[in-house]
Amino acid sequence: MRRHPVPLYTLMVNALAVVLAAALSLTVSAPQAQAATVTVQAESYAAQSGVALEATADTGGGQNAAFLADGDWMRFDNVDLGGTGRLTVSARTASAVGTGTVELRTAGLSGPLLAVIPVSPTGGWQNWSTRTTEVTTHPTGAQTVFAVLRGAAPGDFVNINWFSFAGEGDGATAGWVPVDQAQWNAQLAQFRAMTPAAVLAGVVRVPEFNATCTYSHSKPDDPIVLPGLPGASHMHSFFGNKSTDAFSTTQSLQAHTPTSCTPADDLSAYWIPTLYQGDTAIEPEGMIVYYGSRLTDPAATVPFPQGFRMIAGSAKTQTPTPAGSPGQFWCAGEGGEIGRSADGNWPVCAPKAHLTHQLVFPDCWDGKNLDSPDHKSHVAFTYDGKCSGAYPVAIPNLSFVTSYPTSGGTGGFRLASGMASSIHGDFFNAWDNAALGHRVRDCINQKAKCSAAGTF
């Protein structure tokens, strides 16, 4: 029996209880050809049968392909499968019931089999997991790819948000920034030589520390997406390193010590699109950047490599955010939410409550690249409580919790990037290696809640 569309589940992530990990004993290999990753959104099909679309509660928002049953299919044109090297194929799926597979075929519905991705229940139609498989022999270059659904029983059995194809090419691809192997090995050696501090009695056993930041400055700059192009971006509100601008690099951030964050050892740059009420900018009263773990075992987590950068969310997502939407702005404080803006996209808070948002970043890394062309393909979210496959390295789970000194009103707000759904955040790591390493070792690896000072 095919299911009927249902309202979205509310997606709430508790930043104060982030848990992590994945077995990692990493010895970084010599430089090699970088993986060119192509992400294909499921709703971008060129043709389909039996497919419906719905708003997704997955990170990044947008739509997912829904109500998929045995025999349904989607066709995607001009999917770049890269060169002749290994191909890592992933699918972002959610399922409340049943099992089955997604067959990926080239050329036609019954064409050569590229990969088979298993599907099993994830706990809900909007509880998302990434399934990954490795392909050693495959066609190269641009291909027509068919996703054919094979259910083990009648009825809908899976939703799909996206597919990705990470192929090893013949050389470095534009936009990939490989980690300096010698520097990373030295940073890892320093980290692993650290003796963990003894956890005091009564300490809350949650793997977490934070950087507590105030607003620093605003600029229409983005040193990750538009480096070296001042004024080319929409307006951003910056936190942390007070020198951050379009020309910022790892070296420049390390060289400029003033920061709006505690501790002073964190010279990283954090930024989000500026919020406006009418034409007036409403700058945040503060941001807490939580470093934690969402994985089953946080003990193998390692620090971010120096110069690491990534983005969560998307400025291109422009969809309504009615009450109950995933990842929406909310009201923190006494009285909470008391209404909605006229367009329904923003909460109206009680007089003593403030507009708040929480943005969660991926926590698994490919171990090879400090950045990628879309600033996301070198990282992924955890799957089944661990980091594995193309993303084997467990890194701290970042979460931006931002509070604004306003309760809002019927007129609502807008972001410099557009609608509320376009909220996104950027992280450019410039922590002192020792300070970050000790916090990961003491707080995350030992599953102990620490303050911004890195103490229990």
Image (cartoon, rainbow, N blue to C red):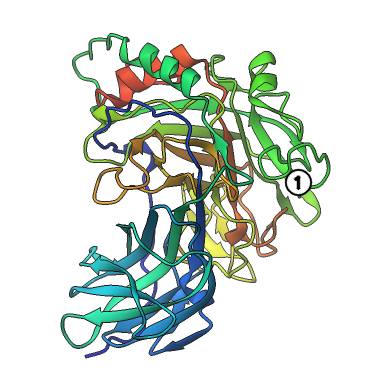
Asked if 277 appears above or below 454 in the picture, the reply is below
Quarter of the figure with residue 267: top right
> Which image quarter is the C terminus in?
top left
Looking at the picture, how far across and down is residue 20, in whole percent?
29, 37
Q: Is residue 187 left or right of residue 424?
A: left
Q: Secondary structure at mark 1?
A: loop
| Residue at x 38%, y 71% (from the top left corner) | 160
Quarter of the figure with residue 103: bottom left
> Which image quarter is the N terminus in?
bottom left
Q: Is residue 203 left or right of residue 293?
A: left
Quarter of the figure with residue 72: bottom left
Looking at the picture, how far across and down is residue 349, in whole percent?
55, 54
Res 125 visible: no
| Residue at x 65%, y 62% (from the top left corner) | 419
Looking at the picture, how far across and down is residue 365, in whole percent?
41, 39
Res 307 visible: yes
Instruction: Determine which residue is flagged by label 1.
Output: 235
Is 39 or 281 nearer to us in this picture?
Answer: 39
| Residue at x 36%, y 14% (from the top left corner) | 189
Amino acid at pointer 1: Met
Is 325 or 371 nearer to us in this picture?
Answer: 371
